[in-house]
Image: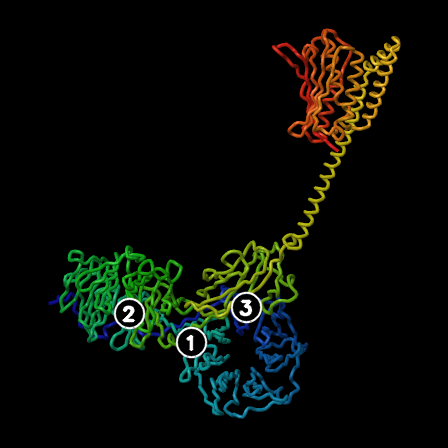
Amino acid sequence: MLKLRCLAYLLVVFFWTGQLGAQQYSFINFTSEDGLPQSQVRAITQDSLGFLWIATLGGVSRYDGYNFENFSVLDGMLGNQVSSMRVDKNGLIWMGLTGGLSVFDGDKITSFKFNETNKTTTAISLFADQDTIWVVTNRGKLIKFHKNEYNYLSDINGLDTLDVQSLMRNDKGKLLLSTVSGVFVFEDKKIKSFEYPELKIDINEIIEVDDILWFSSWRSGLFKMENNSIEHYYLDNQIVRDMVIRNNSEVWLAGGKGISRWDGSRFLVFNKDNGLSFDNVKCLFVDRENILWIGTNGGGLFKFSGELITTTTTRDGMNSNAVMAIIEDDQKNMVIGTYDRGLNFLSKDTIVFIGEEQSLAGNRIWSLEKQKADKLWVASTGGLSKVKDKEIINYSRSDGLLDSKITSLFMDNLLNELWIGSSNGYTLLKDEKFLRFDEENGFPGKRVRKIKKDRQGHIWFGCINGLIEFDGISYKMYTILDGLPSNTIYCVEFDGNKTWIGTKLGLSVLENGEISQIQLGKTTGDFTITFLLNDKSGRIWAGTNNGIYTLQSNPDDTYKIEHYTKENGLNGLECNMNAVYMDTDGNVFAGLASGLVRFDRNELNNLTKDKLQKPVIKDLKLFLKDVDWKLYGDSLIPRTNLPFDLNLKPEDNYLTFEFSTNEFGNPKIVQYRFKLIGAPGKLSEEWSTPTSNNIATFSNLPSGNYIFKVQASNEIGNWSEYSTDYPFIVITPYYATWWFRILMVLMIGGIISLIIYWRLSIIKQKRENKRLMDQSKMLALEQQTLNANMNRHFVFNSLNSIQYYLNNEDKYNANLYLSRFAKLIRKNLDSSQTTFTSLTEEIERMKLYMGLEQMRFKDRFDFNFIIDKDIDLLRTKVPSMLFQPYLENSIWHGILPMKHKGNIDIKIIKSDDENLRIEIVDNGIGIRTSLGEKVKKKSDHISKGMDITKARIELFKQIGKNNAKIIGPEELTKDSKPTGTRVELILPLLQD
């Protein structure tokens, strides 16, 4: 039998009871601190690109979901106090001010002043009708603005007596005027009274939707006219200032005490009591996402997050905002366990508090479970409590619990078993007995945070050291070694054959024995998974420290992920551990550190997440600076001010695109991806990694044609159907164009050709100069040769020889010598005119010389010519007067110094290498002996013939680029004794 630690029979009147206030709706407030120019909002509208425009008494703001861009008199407006606003069919933004109208065309603001009579008149309402702007003034008058001219309609019969508030054109084309005297028809420049007497009251707004006309009255509420029948819905204690229609059926009215919604059966009022912190409302607007915007008279701008999420906090009567456990009793009252104040029983109008003062085991509640017969089990730091009817029973360690601090509960109503998790294991209450399981008896877990049963009947434990599966026989533990991101398990949930696991470091799924991880977000708070819930409609709910996520499976095994944050209506982001519950109506409740949150099942089912509109490129910067794009093109794209056919200079290659979807539901979770067609690398082919950053920068773009593409997706991954494209060109620099390259090739080719021509000319000139110089040297050498061949000694000796023969009256030899001498002189003189002569001529010259010398030195030497018979003597050319110096050297320095007769052989041979070889060989005293004798005698005869010949041969070799050379003179010896001298001349074989 269980011991009762505390048994208390309490009357419910002794419980602490309080009044339950209204649930709180979420209204997101924007003020001057967020960028609005002023807090008194007079009108709201949306342009064709999706930008939200807000008119205030301090200027106009354009909002893209991220930033407010403000306009004022500095931008061309007539004034800063804007009372009305309207977008016409061309996308122009018209603003009504005191003294006239201002219009923004996407580029600049142009203003049109009223006439002098109406310069203090204020345009309080505008209506865009085809090419006409109708203006309602604060004096109740009507002004028509057409083709930039005002028409003050005071002369129309009946109009001057009406106090007009607004106007609209119905589906039949009639212009309806709402006035303080009722509704009138303005047709054919005539004023006609509306047929229905019920509407002969003050009417300030008319809207037609689906053939239904709605009329709002300053003091009489709302009227509906359908099928010529009028219904009146009276709004208690509220003056109506504005009216809008949402979802084609909800009528919203603005007044000085909040806003009211007519849903077809009743009015629901939103004011300070249920979330609208500033309820002096001037205007309303419904954007293309069906989001309701609220302009107040001093509180700035509000965005209504909708009725999906409502909150209950201490403001509404709860005794604590730290909600740790949630459950529903049999009377459909919500039981809330708090961190520090016990239990809160929430009924329709009241709250009942139960805590330690009412004998509860503890005020820090960790878990709640419901047993049949309306038994409520409460896990707290102080132990386990059972609450039933008017009775509280507490259990502790002394009653059989493993630990007094209970951290989790699971009630198996099928088996009537209560599983109780604690720090050192768990306790099972079965058949009114506590059974304890810890490390000593096989349970491996510590600090049990969650206990859950799957469809196979296995019990799962989320512990600080891993996830444990119990099949009734044994325990199986899953840890980081099996693929979990952390061993600290906070929660577990089941979906078919999937086991969802929430850990300290992320969300995991166990399926078919494999663990995979799912990333919900990128912040640290997104990785702490505090609760999991399967709502049985295909959604898995996951609580984190950065809001609440839902996951829905896609056919391709991916997930649609939705993220709920403050933008959607949460009053906080930190979710408490296992503080989640779905009631019998399908509504989901979540416990936050900031209160209790309720997700309405009907609103959740009606929630649609279509693909986003394609993004708008709202700005383009060059080198991170604003640019006047008018300087870059003749025409600009309307309302974006970006140039058509943008052509950028080569150096203007650092671009920053700024874009937005102008979606306002939750702009912070909109993802973008982009690519730049034409860019180098993968960015031209693949989309960038999705990012919430709405800026893309490209630097150092090379010349080329580009197309910037950007898409956007919502939180469930639906990408905009079409991308926004912007083509532009970075002009190729002139030096990289094909024509410039061709020109450069031609120019460089021309320059190279000129350089080559110039160089060749220099080389040619040098060659010519060298040729002339060589020719001059050759002529000089030939002259020197001539001089050498006819040196004074030879001539003097020849004349002495002739004289000798004459004195001896030897006429024959005198005539012979004289004729040979004359012939030699003539040949030398003839050869001096040419560089080359035939070998025949040269042999004859040598024979003449040798003959003359042989006559002079009678019986002193003999000479022989040995000539190769294969040589064509007449056609073969040799340098003229080349050989005589060597013959002279052989005679004078080789033969004559001897006492006996000598011999000289002249050999002319054609060598194997097609050269001409001339050898002069004597049997004289030898070159060395000759030189020695010459030194001793100190002869005054200076022979330069051989030196001249060597110079001629060298020059001949250079000019003709041949192998001409002289070998010797070299001494011939036998038995180490000189036997003569040989000189060899090798010349190229030249022939005519």
Percent x, y for residue 497? 28, 67
- Regarding residue 340, the answer to whether it shows in the image is no
| Scheme of colours in the image | rainbow
Residue found at x 51% / y 84%: 208
Q: Which of pointers 1 and 2 lies earlier in the amino acid sequence? A: 1
Image quadrant containing the N terminus: bottom left
User: Which residue does the numbered mark 3 point to in the structure image?
Assistant: 61
Q: Amino acid at mark 3?
A: Ser
Query: Residue 496 got which mark?
Result: 2
Left or right position of 122 against 874:
left
- Regarding residue 865, the answer to whether it shows in the image is yes
At mark 1, the secondary structure is strand
Left or right position of 99 against 257:
right
Image quadrant containing the C terminus: top right
Q: Amino acid at mark 2?
A: Gly
Depth check: give the residue in front, 986 or 320.
986
Percent x, y for residue 598? 35, 72
